[in-house]
Image: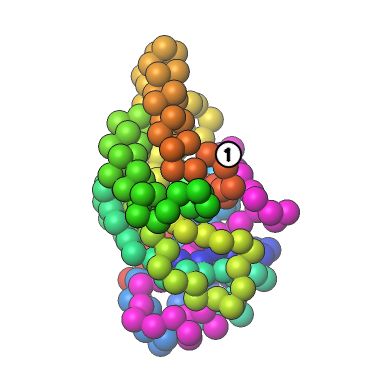
Amino acid sequence: MYAAWGAELPDRLRDQRLHERLAAAGVRRLQLNLDDADVAPAMRIATGADQIAAIVSAWADSDAEVTAALTEATDGLAGWEVDERRPIPPPETPQGVRLDGLANVAVLQRPDDLDRAEWLHRWLVDHTPIAIATQATFGYVQNVVTRQVTEQVPRRVDALVEELFPSAGMSDMHAFYGSGGDDAELRDRLDRLMTSVARIGFDHDIDLVPGSRYVFDL
């Protein structure tokens, strides 16, 4: 998985010539999460000066040629090998067709005061059912970083999480959290979620990238 920066990335990353080069490099499946006009109303969070413009996921057996191709197609790139888990598998979409919804990707860091085993247990075991119960997600993918694949990254990253929400969730908190217009239910869901998020350190030092989600079988 790669975080990408640059101008006009939706066009550059969907270019057929890039996809052909990635296919030649062994990429079987490509997913683009693009911060574009379709998600303009959504919330963004950036740890650095420049907001991440896209998250690129590539399924391949090796990464060197993939990283080289994406480096040339972007103005900035940081990448990681990840171990993927799918508590709520995203719905399949036709080749290159935008998924109807908001695809948020959170780029996350393990707190220094939590060892890896305890952090993984709190996140993958304790937090997962709470996250599912308190939000209107129809797709939920957890990616645990196992290795850095670019020479430099702006900061340490230990996880990338994708959550799919109804499009209305970009501007309506009840739609985002699935609280059905009930303010008391919304407050309860927020309290439960934020308490759990704080236990795993995902309440600070994060990037939140809203996106339009496209998948290509190469």
Q: Nearer the viewer, residue 131 or 167?
A: 131
- In the image, which residues are magenta? 40-68
Please say which color scheme the image uses: rainbow
Q: Return the residue nearer the eye: 80 or 19.
A: 80
Q: Is residue 67 magenta?
A: yes
Indicate the quadrant where residue 53 lies.
bottom right
Quarter of the image for residue 127 reads top left
* x then y, percent, for residue 209: 54, 50
125 falls in the magenta region: no
Residue matched to label 1: 43
Residue 128 placement (x, y as % from top left):
31, 41
Residue positioned 65% across, 69% down in the render: 76
Q: Which amino acid does label 1 sit on?
A: Met
Q: Is the magenta stretch mostly helix, strand or loop?
A: loop
Tell me, yes or no, if residue 135 can be seen here.
Answer: yes
Q: What secondary structure is found at the residue carrying circle 1?
A: loop
Relative to 11, say whether 38 is above or below.
Answer: above
Q: Is residue 18 visible?
A: no
Task: Write the residue at 47% across / 59% down.
Answer: 158
Q: Quadrant of the N terminus?
A: bottom left
In terms of image quadrants, where is residue 8?
A: bottom right
Q: Quadrant of the C terminus?
A: bottom left
Question: How many numbered circles does the render carry?
Answer: 1
Which residue is at 59% across, 47% downward? 205
Q: Is residue 141 left or right of residue 150?
A: left
Where does residue 200 sit, x and y in percent of width and height? 44, 43
